[in-house]
Amino acid sequence: MDERTCDVAVIGAGTAGLAAYRAATEAGASAVLIERGPGGTTCARVGCMPSKLLIAAAKAAQAARNTDLFGIRVAGVAVDGRAVLARVRAERDRFVGGVFEGVEALPEAARIAGSARFQDRTSLTVGDHTRIAFRAAVIATGSSPTVPKPLRGLGDRLLTTDTLFEIPDLPESLAVLGAGAVGIEIAQAMTRLGVRVTVIDSGDTVAGLSDPDLARQAAALFGAELALHLGAKLESATREGNGVCLSWTDGEGRARETRADKVLAATGRSPNLDDLGLDAAGLRLDEDGVPDFDHRSLVCAGAPILIAGDADAWRPVLHEASRQGRIAGTNAAARAAGRAVETPEPWTRLAMVFTDPQVAVIGVPYEADAADRVTGAVDFADQGRARVDGANQGGLRIWAGRDGTLMGAEMLGPAVEHLAHLLTHAIGDGKTARAVLDQPIYHPTVEEGFSTALSEITHSTCQS
């Protein structure tokens, strides 16, 4: 067995792992990067990029079907499912190829292929060929789709985000288990591409919204396009003919059945930690097997080991994984050199769903009847630019402290991916509603909708 030593061993070459390796080496540490495959990052290979490619195709089809509002007549729209998925894969492969090129540009001696397993607090093995002694390590092993037990016997009729984009053609019908960000994005895109879609979720909200009014609006808007069943419990799933049959109970306790060609499990992802030998490393694990770690330094309790990205099951989105990787790599190098670690403040929480209308959840979570805050609201139904574009659906809610300092928001509407960034930055900068109001907003833009909500907040804080 090859015996090696290094300052920092990074396990996983995804978004967080690559960032950790680069940060560690930039801090002067000797580092190795261990990857068992398939590589290419979750985002580029099976996550945000292929899903957005599918959504882009659906958006084009939907736009072509809905031109009458503007006096434009389109005779008919035909969806070529094979061509849609061929483009998804071609562009996906280009993104993944870019990631591989970046990895291959790293020193060959620093890249080790295989599965890592801790032997103790300061050493690990890679497969049966390499043993590495380290001064600090970073766990950045990513995550894998969670498949509920009733779906596990469906074979090739079960899809996850790891397999969805490999199907050669669009199915005629699809059942989606889960109405969270991934589930509702894929469900709406598939519907707009001509697939008959049913969504089943045990919760009572969609797309991660908590504000009751926005959640009701979202359920109504998405439910108008596809069969959306909230508060439902999946009982069993069986192969039937060329498809599947799902037996489930609806929110009123009635037994129901849904038949579809395929079923997509969109019930979340679990950290890839089971085969790492974390007990041998002396780490304290929670009931889900995730190490106890500090959310600022990313240092795990019990060993000179850090954790970043989807592997820590906290804020599993790309921008957070990239930042966590940089923090973990920098701090791993510091631990290896005997220096103090950094403890930066977490970023303002930002989660987005690329449906139509779009959804965003920002900052401090919604809390009903919170006494320490005031809320401003906007309804997009009559917002000028939204009406011009025929996208006047949804609304936004912004909450602030009693002194007007912005705290959080939820949004459902047009251009939310841009509105959310503006508000996230304002919250991160500690701005008040009055300070944001005293900034230019061009007319006519959807951003003008902020003024109504912020004015309500400012008025309320003046009265208190």
Image (cartoon, rainbow, N blue to C red):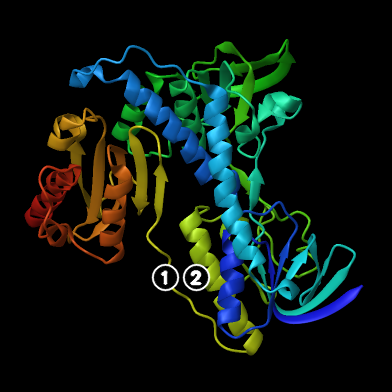
Q: Position of residue 236 (x, y in %)?
A: 69, 20
Q: Quadrant of the C terminus?
A: bottom left
Please name the residue shown 88% across and 75% down the image. Answer: 2
Cα gap from disc 2 to disc 1, whole angstroms:
6 Å
Q: Amino acid at mark 2?
A: Arg
Question: Quadrant location of residue 325?
Answer: bottom right
Residue 217, placed above or below residue 446 = above
Question: Quadrant location of residue 122?
Answer: bottom right
Camera-side residue of 434 and 79: 79
Residue 188, placed above or below residue 351 = above
**Label pair 2/1, CB-CB below 8 angstroms:** yes
Q: Amino acid at mark 1?
A: Glu
Please name the residue shown 52% across and 66% down the image. Answer: 324
Q: Residues within 10 Å of mark 1 (few under 14, many from 20)?
A: few
Q: Quadrant of the N terminus?
A: bottom right
Residue 345 is tagged as 1
Residue, disc 2: 296
Q: Position of residue 153 (x, y in %)?
A: 76, 26
Camera-side residue of 256 and 352: 352
Camera-side residue of 360 and 40: 40
In the image, 152: left or right of 171?
A: right
